[in-house]
Amino acid sequence: MKKVLIFLVTLSTVSNSSLFGWCQSTLKLSKYKTHLEHGTYDQQDWSSFKTKPLSRYDTFKRAFEEFEKMDGHTIVELGTTRSFVHGGLVGCNSDDPQYWTPHNAERWDWGAGCFTRMVSECLEHTNPAIYTIDLASSHIQRCKLITKDFAHHITYYVTSSEKFLSQCSFQIDLLYLDTGNMTPIEETAQLHLREAKIIVKRDLIKSGGLVLIDDVRNQTPKKFGETSEYGKAKYSLPYLLENGFEIIEDGYQVLLRKK
Ligand SMILES: C[S@@+](CC[C@H](N)C(=O)[O-])C[C@H]1O[C@@H](n2cnc3c(N)ncnc32)[C@H](O)[C@@H]1O
């Protein structure tokens, strides 16, 4: 009995590392698996793929596990979770809080990934310092409501990603790159390249740290004539690979590690 008690106490105090290869974030994320998969694949044409790329569920899972294994602390997200409901529903991108249904996850904006909510909820036990950045103050206001239960771990910034990165005074364990829209893609791809250049020049990622890029294999730009396979990462991804990063997960999103 005493041994069981000691085991349970130990288990409850293991806050930031994997135990027997098992991560708390994996368990927490699993309840959102179906939503994340639908959010990745629905309304996209995957006919040119033999098999669909890994979904956001897979790459969030891997990124969160790696973060736990490395005892990570600092997380930065460029481009915040901005809508109470997903595209197509009344209330999408509305400021009206009546559209936020915290107990009905089915309505959340899974098409955009809900990263601020996922990372804060799934990694809360690691006591992270999360910074989420967006140009639009209305988006940050909505995000504050969406992440209300985890706000003690989050600093919300209304500023440009480039300004934040240029002034950032700490190194980052996990960086999520998700600014901009899928159309026009060129504008977003150029923004991501500028962000990547600041990240490298200012050495903002810790050795062994992670960069997760969203929407790399989003098929929307191709509908508008884009030929690159890498969408908004078409310049930033090759740049990061030439500047000390390697791919550790390659799907709808790409997960990189600093060598
Ligand atoms: C696709 S959404 C982010 C989705 C969010 N990461 C999620 O997982 O739900 C893109 C966001 O980037 C923001 N954005 C666009 N350009 C930006 C910039 N230069 N600096 C900061 N935020 C920017 C937009 O206001 C928008 O809220």
Image (tube, grey):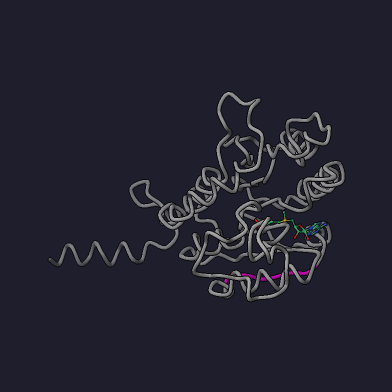
Q: Position of residue 179 (x, y in %)?
A: 76, 53
Q: Is residue 135 above or below residue 259?
A: below
Q: Position of residue 201 (x, y in %)?
A: 80, 47
Which residue is painted at 73% across and 34% down in the image?
230
Residue stretch in magenta: 153-158
Query: Hey, which quadrant is residue 93 in on the image?
Result: bottom right
* Nearest to the observer: residue 136 or residue 83: 83
Q: Is residue 137 above or below residue 70?
A: below
Which residue is painted at 68% across and 64% down in the image?
90
Q: Name the magenta segment's main secondary structure.
A: strand
As for residue 156 lying within the magenta part, the answer is: yes
Q: Is there any visible trace of residue 256 in the rendered image?
A: no
* Residue extending furthest toward the left: 1
Query: Hey, which quadrant is residue 8 in on the image?
Result: bottom left
Q: Position of residue 237 (x, y in %)?
A: 73, 37
Q: Is residue 2 above or below residue 199?
A: below
Q: Quadrant of the N terminus?
A: bottom left
Q: Is there any visible trace of residue 162 in the rendered image?
A: yes
Task: Report whether 139 appears left or right of 75.
Answer: right
Which residue is painted at 55% across and 27% down in the image?
51
Which residue is painted at 55% across and 64% down in the image?
120
Q: Quadrant of the C terminus?
A: top right
Q: Position of residue 166 (x, y in %)?
A: 82, 58
* Nearest to the observer: residue 20 or residue 121: 121
* Nearest to the observer: residue 85 or residue 90: 90
Task: Report whether 207 appears left or right of 237.
Answer: left
As for residue 221 lying within the magenta part, the answer is: no
Quadrant assignment for ligand 1: bottom right
